[in-house]
């Protein structure tokens, strides 16, 4: 579960300015972010592919403030899809945030941008190429699900991320099952109020309950976690319910648990890594630091060492 205090401190403009302008943050940024450009993201995807892992390319950026920025993000995603189409062996996905596509300005325009991105999925590209929608804080859950529902009939290759930490998610899954949804199940990285979200242990229990619903019902489930108990539960369910290996995959974050990625690959399971790239790394990095005290220590040590 995220460290609430760190996420609050990180939201301050002063702290953001200090960290973002500090060269000292660079080694920590480099661990979690592939680089500033699409080419950096593709280079990371190629390196992962040599290890048998496919990538999810994520252009960093969220909460754009005008339509021009949202259009720019859309063009960047179209360029990413174009690039992955010319390298189908990468088998890469892209993942978008609706606040990056302008949902704060206009829901309809954000959906139109999402639709453009989804319709650019190359017909002749890798059969497993997909577009995923990241799930942001609870203020966006309803709108994100609505956007998914609006575009899902046009493509089976649209994936929705849902968060096991939210108390509402089991009901959301039930309501979505009629659409045969492809779901990426994560725990949730945002600082949510207690009345809406579970604590640490309850989130893990919710994750396991959601796996039990999604794995048998969904054509494709992305088990997006580094929690070994949840991963083992997914494997146990898949074996017990005889769910073919091409109906689910394990997903992890760039820079996190390479050892576990390798173990799952050795066991013959599909592993995909979420590869963020772009200059707007600050909120993403803060979420990664907030997930794990050891990461925060690493970061503070780098700053102190100078
Ligand atoms: P948990 O936090 O319990 O960690 C389990 C173990 O994993 C830790 O003990 C540690 O070993 C390792 N670990 C976890 N995070 C680490 C880190 N940052 N650094 C080092 N080690 C770490 N969230 C969201 O709200 N919306 C989204 O769209 C997505 N999308 C997404 C895609 C993919 C592919 C992944 C893997 C994750 C997300 N997330 C996300 C993030 C997710 O919600 C969650 O915050 C992180 O995955 C951490 O939670 P775990 O499930 O790994 O469990």
Image (tube, grey):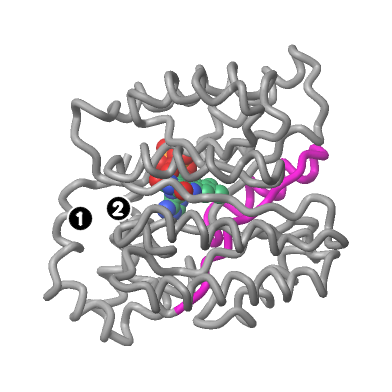
Circle count:
2
Is 235 left, or right, of 63 in this rendering? right
Q: Secondary structure at mark 1?
A: helix
Front residue (pair 222, 71): 71
Q: Name the residue: 32% across, 73% down.
A: 66
Residue under numbered circle 2:
290
Q: Is residue 62 magenta?
A: no
Q: Name the residue: 42% across, 54% down.
A: 108
Residue 153 occupies quadrant: top right
Q: Is residue 67 visible?
A: yes
Q: Position of residue 227 (x, y in %)?
A: 51, 36
Residue 142 occupies quadrant: top left
Q: Is residue 275 above or below residue 172?
A: below
Q: Name the residue: 43% across, 30% down.
A: 164
Would you say the residues marked 1 and 2 are in contact, meaning their CB atoms lie under 8 Å apart?
yes
- Between the residue at mark 1 and the residue at mark 2, the CA separation in whole angstroms equals 6 Å
Front residue (pair 237, 183): 183
Chain part drawn in magenta:
254-278
Mark nearer the N terminus (1 vs 2)? 1
Identity of the residue furthest to the top in this view? 240
Residue 248 occupies quadrant: top right
Front residue (pair 21, 123): 123
Identity of the residue furthest to the front in this view? 108
What mark, if any, has residue 6 been given in the picture?
1
Q: In what quadrant of the picture does the N terminus appear?
A: top left
Q: Is residue 258 above or below residue 282?
A: above
* Neighbours of disc 1 within 10 Å: few (<14), some (14-19), many (20+): some
């Amino acid at each position: 579960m995220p460290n609430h205090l760190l996420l609050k401190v990180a939201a301050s403009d002063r702290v953001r300015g200090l960290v973002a302008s500090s060269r000292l943050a660079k080694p920590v940024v480099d661990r979690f972010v592939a680089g500033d450009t699409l080419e950096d993201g593709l280079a990371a995807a190629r390196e992962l592919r040599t290890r048998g892992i496919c990538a999810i390319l994520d252009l960093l950026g969220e909460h754009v403030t005008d339509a021009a920025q949202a259009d720019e993000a859309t063009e960047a995603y179209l360029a990413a899809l174009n690039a992955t189409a010319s390298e189908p062996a990468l088998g890469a996905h892209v993942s978008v945030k609706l606040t990056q596509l302008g949902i704060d300005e206009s829901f309809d325009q954000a959906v139109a941008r999402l639709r453009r991105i989804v319709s650019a999925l190359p017909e002749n590209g890798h059969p497993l190429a997909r577009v995923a929608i990241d799930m942001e804080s609870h203020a966006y859950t309803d709108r994100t699900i609505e956007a998914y529902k609006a575009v899902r009939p046009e493509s089976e290759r649209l994936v929705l991320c849902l968060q096991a930490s939210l108390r509402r998610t089991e009901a959301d899954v039930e309501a979505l099952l009629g659409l045969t949804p492809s779901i990426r199940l994560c725990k949730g990285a945002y600082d949510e109020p207690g009345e809406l979200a579970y604590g640490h242990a309850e989130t893990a229990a919710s994750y396991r309950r959601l796996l039990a619903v999604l794995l048998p019902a969904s054509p494709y489930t992305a088990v997006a976690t580094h929690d070994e108990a949840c991963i083992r539960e997914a494997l146990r369910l898949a074996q017990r319910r005889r769910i073919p290996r091409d109906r689910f995959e394990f997903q992890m974050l760039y820079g996190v648990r390479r050892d576990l990625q390798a173990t799952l690959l050795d066991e013959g399971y599909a592993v995909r890594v979420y590869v963020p790239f772009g200059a707007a790394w600050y909120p993403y990095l803060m979420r990664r630091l907030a997930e794990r005290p050891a990461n925060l220590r690493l970061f503070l040590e780098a700053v102190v060492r100078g």
